[in-house]
């Protein structure tokens, strides 16, 4: 089967940098996506890695290593509004297989 | 990004009644829409994949007779929770695949704002 693991909770300080890791098990996939979800809201798309390496989108970057079955989301210059849950998801056969989500807590 | 709307945003109903939730892609044609359910502090659980003009594909454990899905047009899919019970109370979210997004194999889904269902 396919599964993803990510930490349930991460705490960081405003202005700092935080990395949210995601490890996965799969027999094949097209890419790894990251979504952000604020409490009470729907997920919003952040980033997608089809190839190994780093993808940068403003303050957010995402990394994928297929050989290590590992990816991460890097958030820089943290702002209080970044407090949310972050999900990694495998793009597999036209479906998204979701991780359990990481709650990011930001302290002033 | 693409816009997906969902209606209603919140609904409270009595046990035994049916509730219909609409999901619309506003600025693109979505041949495929997805319905998710999310319980508090948990991940999204895919319920079914809805393809325009054909029957929905339900995930294991999801009762197709209880959760009726209709995808009658390229911009509208509906989920009807029939004979709702308190355990059906949840956050229901639809998403749509935008065929214009990224390369052909990239799965980018755009989500509706969600519908919070409370069954009393």
Image (cartoon, grey):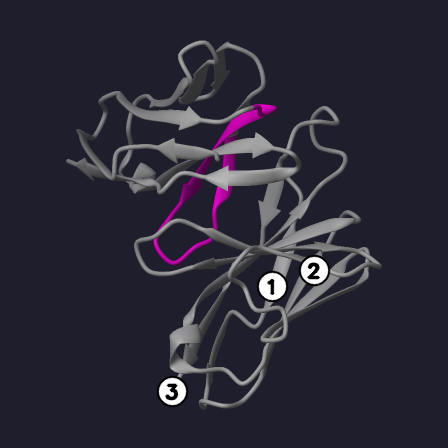
**Is B39 colored magenta in this rendering?**
no
Residue that carries the numbered disc 3 in the rendered image: B120
User: Magenta includes A41?
Assistant: yes
Asked where in the image residue A86 lies, by quadrant, the reply is: top left
Which of the pair A18/A49 is nearer the observer?
A49
Q: Give the mark, 3 or 1, whose residue is nearer the N terminus.
A: 1
- In the image, taking residue A84 as reference, residue B56 lies left or right, namely right
Q: Secondary structure at mark 1?
A: strand
Residue that label 2 marks: B24
- Marks 3 and 1 sit apart, C-alpha to C-alpha, by 22 Å
3 vs 1, front mark: 3
Mark 3, Cα crowd under 10 Å, few <14 / some 14-19 / many 20+, is some
Helix, strand or loop at disc 2?
strand
How far apart are labels 2 and 3 at the CA level? 27 Å
Mark toward the viewer: 2 or 3: 3
Q: Nearer the viewer, residue A79 or B13?
A: B13
Is residue B24 at least partly visible in the picture?
A: yes
Q: Is residue A87 above or below residue A62?
A: below
The structure residue drawn at horizontal position 37% and vertical position 49%, both measured from the top left corner, is A38
In what element is the residue under mark 3?
A: loop
Residue A98, percent from left and from top = 46, 40
Residues rendered magenta in the picture = A28-46
Q: Earlier in the sequence, mark 2 or mark 1?
A: 1
Residue A11, x across and y down, in percent: 18, 33
Contact (Cβ within 8 Å) of mark 2 with mark 1: yes
Is residue B30 visible to us here? no
Residue occupying image coordinates x 66% and y 28%: B106
Q: Residues within 10 Å of mark 1 (few under 14, many from 20)?
A: many
Residue A5 lies, in percent from the top left, at 34, 32
Q: Is residue A70 found left or right of B52 in the rendered image?
A: left
Q: Are marks 2 and 1 on the same chain?
A: yes
């Amino acid at each position: 089967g396919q599964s993803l693991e990510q930490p349930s909770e991460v705490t960081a300080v405003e202005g700092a940098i935080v990395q949210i890791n995601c490890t996965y098990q799969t027999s094949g996939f097209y890419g790894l996506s990251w979504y952000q979800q604020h409490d009470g809201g729907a997920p919003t798309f952040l980033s997608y890695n089809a190839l190994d390496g780093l993808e940068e989108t403003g303050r957010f970057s995402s990394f994928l290593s297929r050989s290590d079955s590992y990816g991460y989301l890097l958030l820089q210059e943290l702002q209080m509004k970044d407090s949310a849950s972050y999900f990694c998801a495998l793009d597999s056969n036209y479906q998204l297989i979701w991780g359990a989500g990481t709650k990011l807590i930001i302290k002033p | 990004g693409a816009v997906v709307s969902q209606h209603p945003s919140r609904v409270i109903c009595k046990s035994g009644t049916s509730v219909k939730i609409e999901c619309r892609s506003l600025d693109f044609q979505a041949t495929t829409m997805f319905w998710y359910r999310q319980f508090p502090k948990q991940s999204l659980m895919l319920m079914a994949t809805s393809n325009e003009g054909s029957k929905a594909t339900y995930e294991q454990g999801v009762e197709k007779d209880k959760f009726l899905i209709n995808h009658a047009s390229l911009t509208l899919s509906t989920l009807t929770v029939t004979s709702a019970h308190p355990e059906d109370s949840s956050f229901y979210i639809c998403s749509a695949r935008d065929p214009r997004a990224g390369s052909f194999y990239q799965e980018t889904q755009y989500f509706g704002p969600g519908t919070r269902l409370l069954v009393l």
